[in-house]
Amino acid sequence: DAKTTQPNSMESNEEEPVHLPCNHSTISGTDYIHWYRQLPSQGPEYVIHGLTSNVNNRMASLAIAEDRKSSTLILHRATLRDAAVYYCILNYGGSQGNLIFGKGTKLSVKP
Amino acid sequence: EPEVTQTPSHQVTQMGQEVILRCVPISNHLYFYWYRQILGQKVEFLVSFYNNEISEKSEIFDDQFSVERPDGSNFTLKIRSTKLEDSAMYFCASKTTWMTPYGYTFGSGTRLTVV
């Protein structure tokens, strides 16, 4: 699986938007971009995924650069519950796709 | 919302003992996985399972590990002779289909402590 690069940590204020960046310059045409998060003492939780177009769901939005070499996870209004480690993972579209986790970005949310 | 259930939440065992970690995946899911996370480190893939056989396994998943789906609902991970370095959080996950775009659902994990 291709590698991703994320900042080690970020801070946000409650109720403000958060933009979590991810670089994946070696992404291939069949790699999907997945985001998972891991709250303290919990298992990873699926957030969102995309291939080429921007995506929205009830949890977040995913903005994918036109060249697909980077993406941004957007939390529209951060809450204290959003404090977690966020993982950006590339997954080859043709495989059973076990996930390869990096270190992710630790998001802190201040009240 | 459907959940992946893992039991026990915490298990303490003596070095050299066998342990079985249990998981109940989501009922209509077909693909099952075990991951582990040593304290302070990354989440690591152990094994994937489909159609009653192992699909893929990592280097970590050596002969001391085995997986089984003994009935239609449970999915177990057995460690035959535990070592201190097996102490970790073990997460079970499942997917409805192999197609990558679909997300995994993870359980809350079993914390294994080997003493």
Image (cartoon, helix red, strand yellow):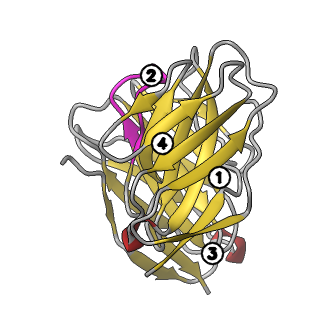
Alpha-carbon span between mark 4 and mark 1: 11 Å
> Residue at label 3?
B16
For the residues beneath circles 4 and 2, the answer to whether they share a chain is yes
Q: Which of marks 4 and 3 is in front?
A: 4
Taking the view exactly as shown, the residue that stands out farthest to the right is: A26
Which of pointers 3 and 2 lies earlier in the amino acid sequence? 3
Residue B27 x %, y %:
21, 38
- Which residue is at 50% across, 36% downward? A62
Type of residue at label 3? Gly
Type of residue at label 1? Glu
Tag 3 and tag 1, C-beta contact below 8 Å: no
Q: Can the viewer see residue B45 in this picture?
A: no
Q: Mark 1 lies on which chain?
A: B
* Residue A43 drawn above or below residue A32: below
In the image: residue A41, left or right of residue B56: left
Tag 4 and tag 3, C-beta contact below 8 Å: no
Q: Nearer the viewer, residue A14 or B52?
A: A14
User: Which segment did they paint magenta?
Assistant: B94-105
Q: Is B96 included in the stretch rendered in magenta?
A: yes
Q: Which of marks 4 and 2 is in front?
A: 2
The C terminus of chain B sits in image quarter: bottom right
> Residue at label 1?
B44
Type of residue at label 2? Trp
Which of pointers 4 and 3 lies earlier in the amino acid sequence? 3
In the image: residue B91, left or right of residue A24: left
For the residues beneath circles 4 and 1, the answer to whether they share a chain is yes
Q: Which mark is on residue A109?
A: none
> Residue at label 2?
B98
> Dot 4: what SS?
strand
In the image: residue A104, left or right of residue B106: right
Residue B92 x %, y %:
43, 51
